[in-house]
Image: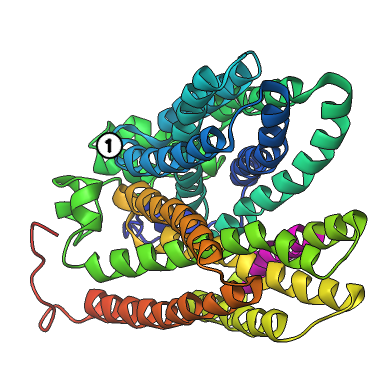
Amino acid sequence: MSTAPKPRQTWQEFLDSAGGMSRRQRVVVLLTFLAMVTEGLDISIASFVYPEIVRDWGTSLGAITATVTSGVLAMAIGSVLAGPFADRYGRRSTVVVGMVLFGTTTAAMGLTTSIEPLMILRVAACVGLGGTVPVLLAVVADAVPSGRRAQMVSLAFCGVAVGTIVGGFLASAIIPVWGWPALLVSCGLAPLFLVPPIVLLVPDSPGVLIARGRPIAEVRSALATLVPGRDLSTVSFAAPAGTGSLRRVSGVATVLSRRFALTTVLLWLAFFIGLGVAFLILNYLPLMVRQQNFSAAQTGVIIGTFGWGAFIGQALVSFALKRFDRFLVVASLWALGLAGIFVVAAFTFGFAGLLLVVFGLGLSLASVSAALNAIGALAYPPAARATGMGWANGAGRLGTLASGLLGGLMLTAGWTIDMIFLAMGAPVAVGIAAAFLLRADDRRRLRRDTAPPAVRRPARTAE
């Protein structure tokens, strides 16, 4: 009988060898999906609440603009701060703090009677929300097999589109009967109900625990929670060869290191363009539709069609990422969106034709963010993943702010909506180029990491 020792595996190789996803891994994805729904609710209800505040309180449009702008900046700040915190102190605790902050302050907004305290609470809520989203997606990336990582991150992100759709229905049901404060309270309580199951059912990342130097028993428990009932005797809980330096540097240093610098900059650019373009379309599509003399009911259907296109597109992206190159998926979505932008700007459509084109814009341009988050999840090692994704999402938030400001400047300068749509073609073209550059950089890093030791360059401690 052979007495040869069993070959050792890293924790990720152990997850990958399971032959599928366990029930607990699916629960982690589901809880993240539901948490993403709360972000979609926030996006949706804001567009319903602010007009009500102007009507009920007589608040100036300038104060509303300041509140919206402050909220977007707060989301970016939350994303930038939460990523390094999660990599250093743990993903689950960061998520819980963010969700509690977002939920309680959103609910408290419904109890305010003037714009000043509402603005303060909104800023706090956006810090919590901005920090929660990228860290939750990093949790999913840490918990699933590497072959399913892009698909599961994208699938969880679909919750945002679902939340925007649900938010519209909630607003139409709650505001006429109980008013907009009740809508804020109900949407603020929603994420709080998710906190207990997240605490009980979502373990910390084994990779982050190893990078933090936590006891082996703690790492073993986290891994056994994700894949219960399997023999862990073959798993090595040491840091993988070649990544030891990651234990001595922060996630920030890793993300900004020479090895990842180009990826980081290109991801920031891609997120900035992706979220900025989608936000600009969502803002100015109603104006374009009204210019074509459609009724209010038809306008509502057209705008809703964009949301449904986003949801279906994000769901399709999650399955496409399992079969196709993730960078080519992003480039293809942007190429399809670029064609749609020129079609909308160059031609006039009837109701049915415009529905089809708007659906295509949602299917393509509003789905890019799901694929970009999947790219971010695979770009960095586990010990720096939350930082990388948090900073990229922060760049995306700044993209939404910049697109709103630029759109306003273009309208002030006398640009027509058709001209604004045409102008969006330039950043989308840049996004396509960024996707191909990201692909080339990923291939370069892969070749370097898999090169024979004789030709591989020594790793730099700063990296």
Which residue corresponds to the image point at 84% horizontal and 40% vertical from the top-left?
169
* x then y, percent, for residue 182: 75, 20
Q: Is residue 313 part of the magenta span, yes or no? A: yes
Which residue corresponds to the image point at 70% horizontal and 67% vertical from the top-left?
362
Q: Is residue 300 left or right of residue 28?
A: right
The vertical placement of 407 against 383, above or below, is below
The vertical placement of 315 against 432, above or below, is above
Image quadrant in which you'd find residue 259: bottom left
Secondary structure type for disc 1: helix
Depth order, front residue of 257/283:
283
Q: Is residue 236 visible?
A: no
Depth order, front residue of 172/452:
172
Which residue corresponds to the image point at 73% horizontal and 38% vertical from the top-left?
48
Number of other residues with Cα within 10 Å of mark 1, as a class: few under 14, some 14 to 19, many 20 or more: some
Bounds of the magenta segment: 305-320
* x then y, percent, for residue 229: 57, 40
The vertical placement of 77 against 349, above or below, is above
Q: Is residue 96 left or right of residue 22?
A: left
Q: Is residue 180 left or right of residue 108?
A: right
Query: Which residue is identified by label 1?
Result: 88
Depth order, front residue of 215/288:
288
Which residue corresponds to the image point at 61% horizontal and 41% vertical from the top-left?
39
Q: Is residue 158 visible?
A: yes
Q: Is residue 331 part of the magenta span, yes or no? A: no
By secondary structure, the bulk of the magenta-drawn segment is best described as: helix
Residue type pointed to by label 1: Arg
